[in-house]
Amino acid sequence: MTTNTSLMRREILEIPQAVDRLLTHGAQDIAKAAQAVRDLDPGVVITVARGSSDHVCTYLKYATELLLGIPVASVGPSIASIYGAPLRLAGGLCLSVSQSGQSPDIVEMARTARRDGALSIAITNDAASPLAEVSSYTLDMHAGVERSVAATKTFVTAAVAGLLLLAEWRGDDALRAAIHALPKQLEAASAIDWPEVRAAITGEQSLFTLGRGPVWAISNEAALKFKETCQIHAESYSSAEVLHGPVSIVDQGFVVLGFAAGDAAEQSLAGITDQISAKGARVFTTSSQVRHATAIEHVRTDHPLTDPIALIVSFYAMVERIATSRGINPDLPRHLKKVTQTL
């Protein structure tokens, strides 16, 4: 590894070890929190987060609804921090996600959710953070220090921690096994960096990312990282929504990156990316079911709900290369800092 390797690149390569560390050292706390959730048997879940952490929550929303049939809603932290409005949360679960655990609005929403009757669980990389202090249970990401401003290790470990919580809550042995198989699969995923996509994006300043279901959260995270690390304007859409207006800006050579997991939405997403490809766009999709779009290399895991985690690791490997090829330091995106504190 050369001295010129970015921190972001190093942290991407550390993801398999970080996930293994989470599974080794964090499983007991996750099991305890899951038991508390089972005892509560909540009828509703709310999530509290911003940025990449909010994309983790979108992923966990779909996973919760698919696995447990419990509706999940994202609540804006300003409901508590600015408006001071109480919520009827008795018997509910509040799941807060924050890498630093320091943002005042996230902390206040978690605190008031607990006050208003919810069981409050925090997923954070700092078990001594203010967010941990106000929550009923804390799930430590065990990601280790993440120095790059762009979150990579913490996004993945937060998603894995939340998914393992759901697996324990449901008593789902198949999902547990798939989660524990992730470290080796993520190592393979980190070696994939989509050179054909990188070549297509060269010189481009605007593109779409697509997903559907749990993998739509990965599309959202990818669009954010394009903006954050590459200064590329990227918009994320559900494949069910992109034909309802956004597709009108697609012209010859427009780049689209479609994320597909091995689940019930794959065929539909592949069909939509084929339609967009037929309009002259350069469309790349993580599916072998496409006919006109370009299928790109990807790692399929042992469960449809763990597939999205492998996809984001490959995306991170690619986007870091795009940033550095453009002469941009992905560790220090302009106008940004590691901990964002909002009220």
Image: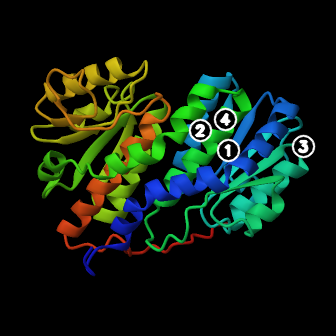
* Mark nearer the N terminus (3 vs 1): 1
Q: Amino acid at mark 4?
A: Leu
Colour scheme: rainbow
Of residues 37 and 183, the one nearer the viewer is 183
State whether residue 52 appears in this view: no
Q: Amino acid at mark 2?
A: Leu
Q: Are marks 2 and 1 in contact (CB under 8 Å)?
A: yes
Q: Which residue is mark 3?
A: 117
* Mark nearer the N terminus (4 vs 2): 2
Of residues 296 and 217, the one nearer the viewer is 296
Q: CA distance from mark 2 to mark 1?
A: 9 Å
Q: Quadrant of the C terminus?
A: bottom right
Of residues 63 and 38, the one nearer the viewer is 38
Counting from the top left corner in percent of width and height, residue 286 is at 28, 34
* Mark nearer the N terminus (1 vs 4): 1
Q: Residue at x 57, y 72 (%)?
A: 339
Q: Amino acid at mark 3?
A: Gly
Q: Which residue is mark 4?
A: 166
Counting from the top left corner in percent of width and height, residue 113 is at 82, 49
Of residues 89 and 313, the one nearer the viewer is 313
Camera-near label (2 vs 1) is 2
Counting from the top left corner in percent of width and height, residue 103 is at 66, 67
Q: CA distance from mark 3 to mark 4?
A: 21 Å
* Mark nearer the N terminus (3 vs 4): 3
Q: Which residue is mark 2?
A: 60
Q: Which mark is residue 47?
A: 1
Q: CA distance from mark 2 to mark 3?
A: 21 Å
Q: Are marks 4 and 2 in contact (CB under 8 Å)?
A: yes
Callout 4 secondary element: helix
